[in-house]
Image (cartoon, rainbow, N blue to C red):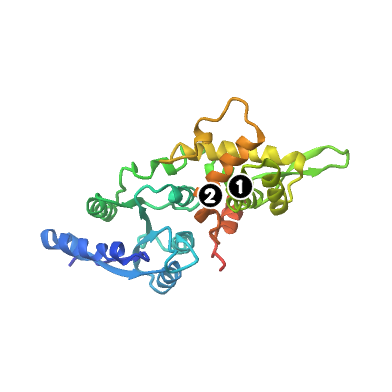
Amino acid sequence: MIEKKKIVVADDNLNWGGQWPRLLQEAAQKDERYSRYTVTLVSTPEAMCERLERDPDVWLAVIDVDFARASRMTGLTALAAAERIAQDRPRGNELHTIVTTVEDTDDRILFLHTAFQCFGPPPVDLIYKDNDFTRTVLEAVGHLSTGGRSSGQRFAQFAPRSPGAGLLMHRLLGGARQKDRKDGKQEKEDAPGINLALWRALSGITAEEGDDAVRGVQKIQQATGIKSKHIYKYMDDAFAAAAEVATHMRFPPRALIAPPQQKRANDVIVALREFAAIHALFFQAPELDQIVERLLDPVRKPRRFRD
């Protein structure tokens, strides 16, 4: 008798989520091994979390990254729940995750970097909703069922380059700030959320404000509390991290991939504002405060995200 394996798919677009049971049912008509899979569809991260909490036999959680149609939360909430539950599972009853999203869209890239860098164990695969969807679904499920993994080619660019490599998302969202010492000098102090506050401020700056360095900097200062004499150091650090992300984007801000030899204040703030605007969905995600805590916490304990 073939052992049944439960799959839960969280996607607010039922046209794509509904493909999973259909594809597996059609595959089972040609190969009975695919008949072992049962698929449950949910439309929000909260529903995925509830399902994982209630059913200890879920084998695979397939998680979309954006649920704007159905929930203010994102797929990061479901990934955090799956991580916590997976680490409590006994050997032989593993819970796996697969991330799915629309085809290589720039405003989803930071979600994918976060998924593969900030959770342990990370998702076993990435499936794009594109013309290759059928093949990749059957391939991913087949590999996983036999105890293997996909080649990793679909998500290699989002995973850490090596086990000891610094995380891109730590550089992008972490940060440090200056504090005064008794001798009057400055030293850096870890400040969880300082870079996130910077990005959230930048994503709220209009093009008109962004074209004027003075007004743009004033808005950033108000949002972050960074002193004016230090603010360009933070923006330079943010520029470097954003420039690395830009190498993975299809349509990156031009000033990030070909910056002028001598960057003026306007050059920096305009490029960062454009980058922040593209990724506003990510920077405004309600889970990011907890993500930053995880990045700056050396223990990296799994957590339940707060609403």
Q: Eyeballing the image, is 280 above or below 17?
A: above
Which structural element holds mark 2? helix
Residue holding disc 2: 277
Q: Which residue is drawn at 17% across and 60% down?
A: 33
Q: Which of marks 2 and 1 is nearer the N terminus?
A: 1
Q: Where is residue 47 in the image (x, y as percent from the top left)?
A: 42, 71
Disc 1 marks a residue whose amino acid type is: Glu
Q: Which of 245 and 55 is in front in this view?
A: 245
The reply to whether residue 9 is in sight is yes
Three-letter code, disc 2 = Ala
Q: What element carries label 1?
A: helix
Q: Where is residue 154 in the image (x, y as percent from the top left)?
A: 34, 44
Classify 10 Å Cα crowding around label 1: few (below 14), some (14-19), many (20 and above): few
Q: Mark 1 points at which residue?
A: 208
Which dot marks residue 143?
none
**Could you say where residue 290 lies in the image, as x and y percent from the top left?**
58, 58
Relative height, residue 282 to residue 43 (above, below): above
* Residue 6 as seen in the image, left or right of residue 188: left
